Image (tube, rainbow, N blue to C red):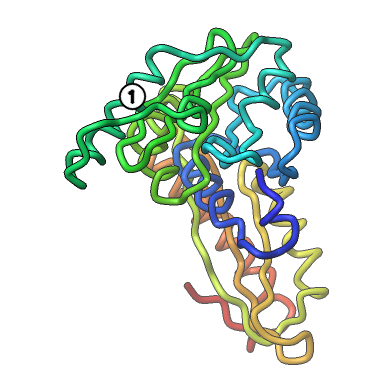
């Protein structure tokens, strides 16, 4: 969430980090969307996501005290629920500001409107403790989808994810783990390699193969990523090995000078 992403001021490192973590926990990521700081836009995007019935929907950003922190308002609109001060969340925020006050030698802590805003959640939502910052994360269930809202500050987002969200994702994926292997092909154009990759994937249907050009088309250096999700280490390694060997043979059939290594 955030205008700063849409105008290019801020790089969306949160999405990249969460996608990587979820993938390695065995949860496939289907879509990443950036939305403006507008409650109606957020609500429309959440409704569209929920319509696809995902197991999880995760948002980052927009949980703070400022006027443009609209995520929880958008989620409430999407779910057709009221916003209300959540006692548990308010207590979390109070304790945080009391700790800040002690550090600064301040005796009185005021829960201003802006601070209370961070504890104003959609009905039936659960606050998630933020060990690094102030605004709690939020978890709410809509039918079969668990909707999770995390702060946009990367250190806070990562702390909450590691503490509370990663265990949820791992529980959902069971024993499944993401496995991958990278190899490199020199001296063959990507356009020449493309049909070979198609052939490898047909012969190894549980393996996904993706080429990543690192050089130029006329001086090719390609990284080839093989990946699969499995619940057994040995089986995953064997599947990856077979797929890599399949590509190696096909490349060798074109011209023995092509090199596959990795």
Residue 99 relative to residue 76: left or right: left
Asked which quadrant contains residue 156, the reply is top left
Residue 189 locus on image (x, y percent): 77, 81
Residue 114 locus on image (x, y percent): 51, 33
Closer to the camera in the image, 195 or 110: 110
Residue 19 locus on image (x, y percent): 56, 46
Q: Residue lying at the far bottom in this picture: please name it.
A: 219
Residue 120 relative to residue 136: left or right: right
Closer to the camera in the image, 56 or 222: 56
Please report the residue visible at 77 percent of the width from the left and 23 percent of the height from the top. 47
Q: Can you say whether 253 is above or below 202 in the image?
A: below
Residue on which disc 1 sits: 92
Picture mark count? 1
Residue 68 locus on image (x, y percent): 66, 41
Please report the residue visible at 75 percent of the width from the left and 64 percent of the height from the top. 196
Closer to the camera in the image, 48 or 151: 151
Please report the residue visible at 50 percent of the width from the left and 54 percent of the height from the top. 180
Please report the residue visible at 63 percent of the width from the left and 84 percent of the height from the top. 186
Secondary structure of the residue carrying tag 1 is helix
Residue 120 relative to residue 92: left or right: right
Asked which quadrant contains residue 164, the reply is top left
Q: Can you say whether 48 is above or below 102 in the image?
A: above
Closer to the camera in the image, 53 or 234: 53
Neighbours of disc 1 within 10 Å: few (<14), some (14-19), many (20+): some
Image quadrant in which the N terminus is located: top right
Residue 252 relative to residue 65: left or right: right
């Amino acid at each position: 969430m955030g205008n700063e992403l849409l105008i290019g001021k801020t790089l969306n490192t949160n999405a990249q980090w969460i996608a990587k973590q979820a993938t390695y926990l065995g949860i496939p990521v289907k879509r990443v969307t950036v939305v403006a700081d507008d409650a109606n836009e957020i609500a429309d995007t959440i409704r569209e996501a929920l319509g696809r019935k995902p197991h999880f929907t995760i948002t980052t950003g927009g949980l703070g005290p400022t006027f443009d922190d609209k995520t929880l308002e958008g989620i409430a609109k999407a779910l057709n629920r009221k916003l209300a001060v959540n006692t548990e969340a308010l207590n979390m925020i109070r304790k945080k500001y009391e700790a800040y006050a002690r550090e600064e030698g301040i005796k009185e802590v005021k829960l201003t409107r802006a601070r209370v805003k961070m504890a104003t959640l959609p009905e039936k939502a659960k606050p998630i403790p933020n060990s690094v910052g102030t605004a709690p994360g939020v978890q709410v269930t809509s039918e079969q989808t668990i909707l999770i809202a995390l702060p946009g500050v990367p250190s806070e987002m990562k702390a909450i994810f590691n503490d509370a969200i990663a265990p949820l994702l791992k529980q959902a994926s069971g024993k499944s783990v993401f496995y991958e292997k990278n190899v490199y092909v020199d001296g063959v154009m990507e356009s020449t390699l493309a049909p070979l990759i198609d052939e490898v994937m047909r012969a190894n249907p549980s393996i996904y193969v993706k080429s990543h050009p690192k050089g130029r088309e006329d001086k090719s250096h390609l990284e080839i990523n093989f990946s699969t999700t499995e619940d057994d280490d040995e089986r995953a390694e064997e599947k990856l090995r077979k797929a890599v060997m399949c590509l190696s043979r096909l490349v060798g059939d074109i011209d023995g000078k092509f090199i596959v290594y990795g």
